[in-house]
Image (cartoon, rainbow, N blue to C red):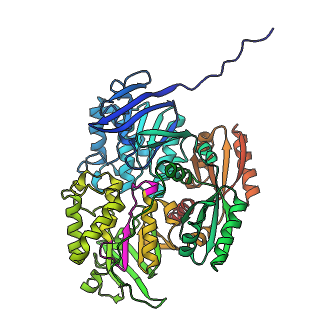
Amino acid sequence: MTGAPQIEKTPESAIRLRGLRKAYGKLEAVRGIDLDINQGEIYGLIGPDGAGKTSVFQILGGVMAETAGEISIYGKTARAARSEVGYLTQAFSLYQDLTVLENLHYIGDLRLLTRREIDERGMRYLRLFDMDKFTDRLAGRLSGGMKQKLALACALIAEPRILLLDEPTTGVDPVSRREFWDTLAALSAEGMTMVVATPYLDEAERCSRVSLMFDGRIVETGTPKELKRNLGLQRLELRTDDLGRAEEILNRVDAIDDVQRFGDRLDLMVADAAAGERTARAALEKENIAVRQIHVGQPTLENTFVAVLRELEGKLVAPPFPRRRDFRERETDAVAIGAERVNKIFGDFVAVRDVDLSIGYGEIYGLLGANGAGKTTTIKMLCGLLEPSGGVIELAGERGRTRSPFVRRRVGYMSQKFSLYDDLTIEENLDFFAGVYGVPRAEREEKKRWVMEFSGLRGQEKMMTGELPGGWKQRVAFGSAILHEPSVLFLDEPTSGVDPLARRAFWKMINELADRGVAVLVTTHYLEEAEQCNRLGFMVAGEVVAEGTPTSVKAAQSGHLIELITDRPQAASDLLKTEMERWRVSIFGDRLHVVVEEDVATGIARLKQRLAAAGIEVADAYEETRSLEDVFIAVVESKREN
């Protein structure tokens, strides 16, 4: 007698969209989306600025009504399901002048929770996020990472079945980002369903599935692994001493699909690695450019994103900057930005301690650190906005006289928080900064046109700056900072919230400026982007604790990164975190990353043995290349332990 046929259980559908449309007058922002999201999934919705992602989130959150289509959230309409949905908006939506606990009480009251429920759940999430010591701190005085953790705690206090996260980690440092995503993985393992929009494609790698959205439509869907496989291209890392010329030459080679410049290498996307290497070597040798090394690497999700978008809207070509200033020749060892044992003390608090820096003309230097590490304070001292408590600063050829009119005309500064006036139009902002920087009147109109083209906002000069989405505002702010063609440029998180295509345009322009001899100091929390710097400095608690090229900083780290494929990644993560430093273990979708100090074979054997003893099967284990984010977290956490 045979048993009854086994019916494979399909995951329960949490969100179902059919023909979803949203129009704002004549503008159709969402154009007929079909989507199925299963219970417990972390689902990524990615796309360029203006793709329609936020409109989808607002409809799912019941904030606004759809124009047409069907929406089902566990069988209910979006409006009827609001009590089961938590929504973390793109902008920080809590009250700056309320404390952490007061914000939780306010949101809990809105959700009609009892005071006991608010206190129990609120403290549980604050302990989970390591914020239970800050209940009396005003929200406006929290770091970027802590603000986002508080916003997430407020979204979770009603214990929703669905969590909507619209760019939740913009402006959040890498350590906090990783903690944030590990928390999301734990909530997903408990059955909570999440939809996440993010401009950071390394984050999208952590999602169960991803949909790429463009011009109001979904153009591709799959797991991160499937999307990268469907790309059909391989990545080559090429190292040469003349990156600028090599990039220009290889961009003209038809057999090379894409060329992206980084701080000490070029990344080439080719159909076949061996044939691509031969083609690249031949093209460069013909121009007498020596190739030091070519290495085959795995394509990233960002490679896939850029390739798909280029098919849809063509190759992104940034307009040439209207150069009007001749840069004088300088000695190769001339210091553009220098610091000797610079300190900054606020009362009893040492914000910056004995910082030494020497940045040359034509160099792109990345200053990296967690929120509160002292980066912005250091930049303000270096560019003369803040007086140091001790030490000597050299800027644009002047030693100790960083506030002189001569220096002011040669420095550009794009601030992390304030760069533009929201209550002025774009054109009024550009006129203001052109006047402040002393741009000759004969050049202003041409340069303003360049900013509008670079920003993708031609014809929108009369638009109020406060109405711009974050990514577009950053583009205008960047253009404003270089109107006067500075010889030294400070960029404090310039691409925060900017999509990958626009980020490329930023870095193409930054590299062009550096090739002309401009010294650039940049901070960023997106460490895949930091690879584009020539040198890096890692700041922890006000000190620069590591420095070097992206490649040398990675090579200096001990240990190995092991990637594990297991049937129970969350259980494996929870177990290993009880036995190792927590920063050594992190979940990436269906994979687990573990940093071990012993050799690879011994590390894999030990991990397999420990997990098997707990009944957790490991299907595969192998060494994976460490990212700059892995290195950053290791450096920061090791310093904290010491």
Q: Is residue 144 above or below residue 247?
A: above
Measured as percent of width and height from the top left, residue 364 is found at 46, 74
- Residue at the extreme top of the image, as rendered: 1
Q: How many labels were placed on the picture?
A: 0
* Camera-nearest residue between 151 and 120: 151
In this rendering, the answer to whether 195 lies above or below 459 is above
Q: Image quadrant of residue 357?
A: bottom left
Could you say which is closer to the camera, residue 14 or residue 439? 439
Q: Indicate the position of residue 346 as horizontal and vertical percent values.
A: 30, 71
In the image, taking residue 128 as reference, residue 25 lies left or right, namely: left
**Does the magenta portion include 167?**
no
Res 19 quadrant in image: top left
Can you name the residue that lies furthest to the bottom here? Answer: 331
Residue 499 magenta: yes
Which of the 4 quarters of the picture holds residue 257? bottom right
Residues drawn in magenta: 482-501
Give left or right: position of 220 versus 388: right
**Left or right: 206 as drawn, with respect to 350:** right
Quadrant (top left/top right/bottom left/bottom right) for the N terminus: top right
Q: Report whether residue 374 is seen.
A: no
Q: Residue at x 64, y 49 (%)?
A: 232
The image shows residue 587 at horizontal and vertical percentages of 57, 46
Answer yes or no: is residue 462 visible: yes
